Image: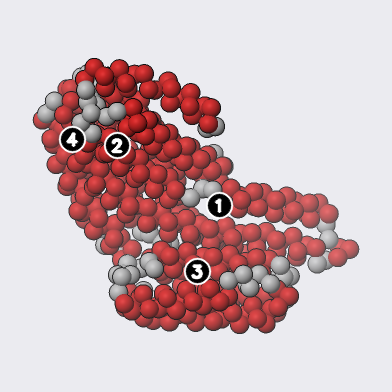
Amino acid sequence: MTRLDVIKMIGDVITDIDVARGSLLPDDPNRHQLDDLRILLDDRQRKLSKAAFDDTTQQFQDSAKKLQAVNDQIRGSIQQVNKIVTVLSNIKTFVDAVTSLMTAIGPFV
Amino acid sequence: MNTVEKKRRLESLLPAVLIVIAAAGCARPSAYKAPVGKFRDASTVVIQSTKAYLNELNKVERDKYIYLQASKPDQIKIDEIEQVQVFSKDGIMARLNALDQLASYVDLLDQLANSNTPETIKTKASDLQTSLTNLSGQVKALTGEDDKQFKSVAGRVLPVIGDLLQAFAEQAIENALKKAIATGADPVNQLIQAIEQDATVAYERRRNGLSAARVILVDQYNREFEKGKGADPAKLKAYADAISAGEDRWEAFSTAQPTDGLEAMKRANQALVRFAALPKPNITDVTSFVNAMDSFANTANRVGRAVQELLGK
């Protein structure tokens, strides 16, 4: 995987989160949690967009592989706001995996 | 373009190409005339579309921040506006300049295939060489972390293209076109690749911004709707119209990937190289060359139309 693949993957999750956010009323407490998680992911995607680093290192590849596995697990589940507890938990898992990846390449971002 | 139109265009191009090949036994500059012209036109569309994305990158980031704060609502701070920019102003200028030089290079190829005035070509090659030297200086001065990759590729390929242009200015047109295609293809593709990476980032960040905007528009409507009997029907209608327009933009956006056009440009550039390398192209080679340029033109037009629609131009 490349840096661009990761940026795109995060983008896919963000657009799914937006579908979930837009399906809840603005003052719904679950909506606020979704908003917060979106802000976190947006910030990470922006940092990855600005960063220049070697995405062929083993460290990056291992972290990206883990992120891909999480993404495969949660794919298609984020828009299901009728199962909001699972949705929030899945997004948190994904955000954690992104944070781990960024920690792995820490000095560059 | 549909199949019938495509066939008609191919038929209109073939005679000119075949006459020249039959007469010369190899692909002389005039054999490239129509396909290289098409390559130039399609490249112009792709380059303009990519420039539009890069030009708007920081605006997308700014607007996303501003409208997000307004929708919460929360304080807007200038220092936060500046923090959300992805590329520095100098970084964007250097990339736009590189795209302009790429357009000039493709234009020069077209003139080599069409012109009978070597002096004009030599002057243009020399002018472009000077512009590339200036661009090299501009790229060298970039200091941002986000510029590293572009700087590395541009630093490597710009001198190669510059040397090639020097050769242009010194030799006969017949040889220059073939030499340009064969020698210039690789560095040109590397430059396209570097810009493509930045364009992908620009596209993803724009997707992110448009996706956020969809929610802001829906929220606007829902806030009014939640007032129940107190909701203003005129406002509800206006907000619904805004959602509808936003959804149109979102739909158009999915077909407006600048990277599609840049990838097609790289493929067409490789097709030029393959054709230029043939000592005696046959009918199949010519057909394949013309088809490659047609395919590039189709992709370029699709992306160009979608980007124009997206930007409301």
- Residue assigned mark 4: B179
Q: Disc 3 and disc 1: Cα gap in Å?
A: 17 Å
The chain carrying label 2 is: B
Q: Is residue B252 above or below residue B20?
A: below
User: Which of the numbered marks, if any, corresponds to residue B272?
Assistant: 2
Using the rendered image, report if marks 1 and 4 lie on a common chain: yes
In which quadrant of the rendered image does the C terminus of chain B lie? top right
Which chain letter goes with mark 1?
Answer: B
**Nearer the camera: disc 3 or disc 2:** 2
* Residue at (63% x, 73% y) in the render: A77
Question: Who's the residue at 37% across and 22% down the image?
Answer: B14
Look at mark 3 in the image and give the residue it sits on. A10
Residue B303 or residue A28, whichever sits in front: B303
Q: Looking at the picture, how far across and down is residue B173, in whole percent?
A: 18, 25
Chain of the residue that carries numbered disc 3 in the rendered image: A
- Tell me the chain of label 4: B
Q: Report the mark closest to the observer, 1 or 4.
A: 4
